[in-house]
Structures are given as C-alpha cells and as structure tokens.
Image: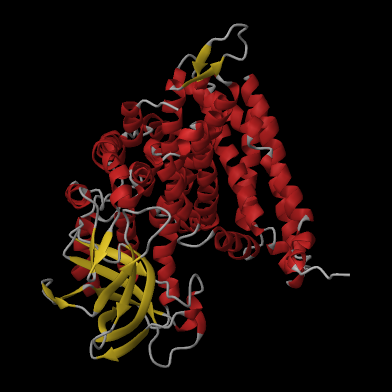
Amino acid sequence: MAVNQSNTASTMSSYRAPLRDFHFLLNEMIDLQAIARLPGFEEAPDVVDAVLEEAGNFAGNVLAPLNASGDRQGATWADGNVTTPKGFKEAYHQFADAGWIGLPLPAEYGGQGLPQVLSTATLEMWNGSNLGFSLCPLLNQGAIEAILLVGTDEQKKLFVPNLVSGKWTGTMDLTEPQAGSDLAQVRTKAVPQGDHYLLSGNKIFITYGEHDYTENIIHLALARTPGAPEGIKGISLFIVPKVNVNPDGSLGERNDIACASIEHKLGIHASPTCVLNYGEKGGAVGYLIGQENEGLKYMFIMMNLARFSVGIQGYALADRAYQMALAYAKERVQSKDIAAKEWTPVRIIEHPDVRRMLMDLKSQVEAMRAVAFYTAVALDHAHLNPDAKVREEQQAIVELFTPIVKAWSTELGTELVSEALQVFGGMGFIEETGIAQLYRDVRIAQIYEGTTGIQANDLLGRKFLKDMGKTATKVIGQMQATVKELEASLNEDCQAIGKELGKAVGALGETSLWLGGNAMKNLKGTFAGAVPYLMLWGYVAGGWQMARAALVAEKKPGDDFYQAKLATARYYADHVLNHALAYKHEITTGGPSTMALSEEQFEADRKTLALA
C-alpha cells in the first residue's frame, strides 16, 4: 500500500494541544474564581491562558519532534553511565529554565505556586507530546512533595530548591527483585552511621535512576534499619544523593550507588529504567526522612501524586492517538461511499465505522480529562482551603478518585490507542506511521505505580468499604442531582443524556450497596469484582462530567465548539454509558464463577490423554 511519506512524518511529529477544551474546563466547568480565592492562587486567573499557550507551544515545537527519534535511539548504558537520546538533554534544560518543573510548587522554594488543576493541563501536554521525556520531571514533583511534607528544615533548604529549578532531578527507589509491588518484602538495609545511614541493597525498575541531564540525582529510597519490624511496619524512607551534598550545598564525592544496567522494554525507550546497586563499596550515604519505620506512609505521598499523573498519561496518549487517527482518516482515500450507487472512492473519515471509532476516541478522552480536572480541583481545596471541614471532604474525594483516575484512564487509554491504530488499518502496524510507538508506550501505564488490580483493591477496600460508602454515597447524590437537571432541560439531547446517565448512576448505586452487604458474607467473591467496580466508577463518573458539559453547551447554540461538545456528550451517553449495566451484572453475579476452578483445573485441558 502506498502512503504519503511526508504526511506520515508530519503526523508522527506533530502535536496540537487541546487548548480550547482546557479553557472550557477551567472557565466553565470549574469555578476558577473559587480556586483563585485559595491562599497563594490569587493571580491564577490572570496567567492561565498564557501558561496554557506557552505549554502548548513547548510541547508541540520542542518535545513532540523528539518523540519518534527518542523511541528509535533509546537510552543507552555503558560502564554505569546512561546517555539519553539526541536532543533530550537540551530539551530538558529548556524545560527547566522555563520554570515548568516548579509550576505547582511553593514560590518560597523557587516554584510558581499555581494550582494543581492548571498543572494537570500541562502534564497532559508533556505526556501527550513525549512520554519518554515527561517521566523525568514527573518524578521530581513526587520527591519534592515528600521532602516538603515530612523533611526537616535543613533537608528542605538543602534539596528542594535545586529539585524545583531542575538543576537536580529526583527518583523513587521502591521496587526490589524479590518484592515487586509487595513492599513488605523490601530488604535494602540502612545502618546508622553518625548523622546519616549507610544503605546497601538492590533496586530495580527505577525510572531515570541514572541519566545525563543533571549533575546530581536525589534518590528517595525505601530501606530497613537494624531491628526494624518485619513487613510494611518496618520500612523507612531515605534521601540518597547520587553525589553527596555538603552542608553548604556544594557537591562532594560520588555516593556509593551504581547503575548496573537498564532494561530493554516494550516501549518508553527514551526513558532509562535502571537497576541500581547500593553499597557495593561499603554503603551509600543516606539521610532519614521523617521517622524510622514510617516510610510506607511517606512513600504514599509520592505514590499518590505519581498515580494521578500516570492516569493523565493514559488519556494524554489516547488524545495523541486520536489526533493521529483523525489526520490519517481525513487524508486516506479507500473504498466507495456506502450510500453512492457509483464507485466513488472517498476518504475513510466518511465511512460510518471510522466515524464510530473516532467518536469513541473523542468522547472518552474528553470524559477522562474532565474527571481528572474534577479530581485536581479537589486536590487544590484539600491542600489549601481555609475551612478544615472542606479540606477533609475534598481529601476524601481525592482519595476516592485517585485510583479511578489512575486505573480507569490507563485501561481505557490503552484500549483507545489500539482503536486509533485500527483506523490506520495495516499501516497502523508499521512503525513509520508512529501509532505503533504510542501503542507500545501506553501499555506500561496500566502497570507502574500500582497495577489496575492494586488500584481496584484500594478503591473497594480502603476507600469504599473502610468508610462504609460515605464518600461514594455523597458523590452519587451529586450525580443524581445532575440527572434531575438534565431531565428538566428542554434540549432533546440533554434529556436523552439524562435518561442514560440515570440508568448508569442507578447501576452504580445498586452495585455499591450490594458490595457493602456481600463483603460481610464472601470477601473473596466481593473482591473478584474489584476491577469491574473501578471501571464502573470510571465510566459513570465520565458520563457525569460529560453530562455537566452538555448542560453548559446547550445554553450556547451556534458555536461549533459547543455543538461538538453536546453531540460528543450524547454519543458517550448512547454508546459508552451502557457499560455500567454490564458491569453491575458482572460484579453482582460473577464472583462465584471467578473463583470456581481449583488450581489443577486451570490445566485440566493440558493433561495427557489416556490411551485405550
């Protein structure tokens, strides 16, 4: 099949940020003025448009052109050193010099002190334009957050400004070969030595654990002190610099940390995933952060922010895939118009099934984006609202929705990138079109920072059952209020959306009640439905946000953006919300069949046949 190589190259490298949708979410779906009344955010409304415009330019003009070449070249390892792909180091310094790392961080440490909801928009642009690059600054913010919340004043002064400026980068060193996601199995040792500790052990899957961007890397590592309790209660958290830092902030000798290798991965080739050896020459100097044996609690400070950010990766790559599929569909001529009597070859965007796939992408990306923005608003209020009761309520929203944003958005993002590849047909399987790279890259998002199963268990066990469904019930009540608004609308589309959303919200409420009761009777059978329950929440929350958008759009006829928003919300209601009823059936009836087989029966069809 012939393909226009110049157009293919343009599709691969181009990225257009959804600035109009960001503007809509920030100014019409969210009460930005309420955000601006939070301490430190007073100037946010004045700079929002400029920040979005500049971020879109940086993503499209600096990061996106490096995405394909970074994938082809990949990060390379030699003698303990890692070299990133051509152009990445220079892009990183431009990124840091422009102040993007410090966007949501306190001004007293060199940040810009802007809301998390605005940072959510910029994170989508970084991830959508170049996921391999964006993983480095993403981890910086988690490390900074942990040090700011539980570090000493001296630690904050010594490490945070250089992390905020991007002069240094940060990592999370959690996983070990025997541990995986089970951090209770962490075995790295930390032995007290005067005012510091000496660490020894092995860490794997450390994103940007070694690279050539900066003069120093600040590792936040989990380890056990002598006599620490077994399991998760005996883990402590340490600041371990790649190069030791003197009390005056100058750099000393190289610390006892060595990069033994980098992984050869399915995707994100530009991002080095490192194996780190601590203490091969006597011990890596580390500094306890917070209290001994409280490391798991502190780790979740980093982890929860990272999980939210990874959720953004899921829909960011789906949005990039949508852009690529749409551009290809508007150019590719294939087959006749299905309604034409004569053979009249048309662009594939005119075929109904291609339209269906494009609408799948557009509607569900917009739904995921809106749910993430809703969660980001809660984050801002949970951190800074002067009313303690509001902070508590909003923190509960954050805790409920963080696993949903992470897991639903990455599961759905992977599915949608696959559907975008399908729009390309056979050309989608060819590397030159670029969509295959997105398919490889997005797959990791369902795994790192906690798999979908881990997120689902967290949602069902720690977030829903633990508070007896209090927060979930409150959110479902808000959804039901939106259904009533839709039913009262005179707009035909809004009425139809209200009908479908009402069914979906009903399914969510009924399923939640069933789970609450069944957990006391059959815990394993209940948790067999954990992932479906998380997905149910995601689809219904997405439909809720799309419905809210429709209520705004119906009041502004005659504008293409609002007409498209209303039609897209209607598509989501007609084609996507019906997942809710299927998930209700699966959760409430499927537990026994999930657990029905013995281990031996899983291989019953592999046994050797007995000969007569």
Going by the picture, which residue comes out furthest to the front?
612
Residue 499 position in % (x across, y down): 70, 31
Q: Residue furthest bottom?
A: 227
Q: Position of residue 565 (x, y in %)?
A: 51, 26
Give percent across and percent down for residue 108: 21, 58
Location of residue 309 with respect to 482 vertically, above or below: below
Instruction: Kindly tell me whether residue 40 is visible in this rendering.
Output: no
The location of residue 601, given as percent across then percent down, is 77, 68
Direction right: furthest residue: 612
Residue closest to the eye, 299 or 31 = 299
Up the image or down, 371 lies above or below 597; here it is above
Q: Residue at x 42, y 21 (%)?
A: 331
Q: In the depicted view, which residue is nearer to us: 312 or 164?
A: 312
Q: Residue at x 23, y 91 (%)?
A: 194
Total label count? 0
Query: Residue visible at 59% across and 38% down?
Result: 544
Side of 37 relative to 61 (left or right):
right
Examine the image and state in which quarter residue 265 appears.
bottom left
Instruction: Tell me which corner region of the image, top left, top right, bottom left or bottom right, holds residue 61.
Output: top left
| Left/right of residue 137 with respect to residue 212 in the rendered view | right
When the figure is inspected, residue 460 is found, relative to residue 93, above or below; the finding is below
User: Looking at the image, can residue 181 be seen?
Assistant: yes
Residue 523 or residue 109, whichever sits in front: 523
Task: Indicate left or right for 90 with 105 as reference.
Answer: left
Q: Quadrant of the N terminus?
A: top left
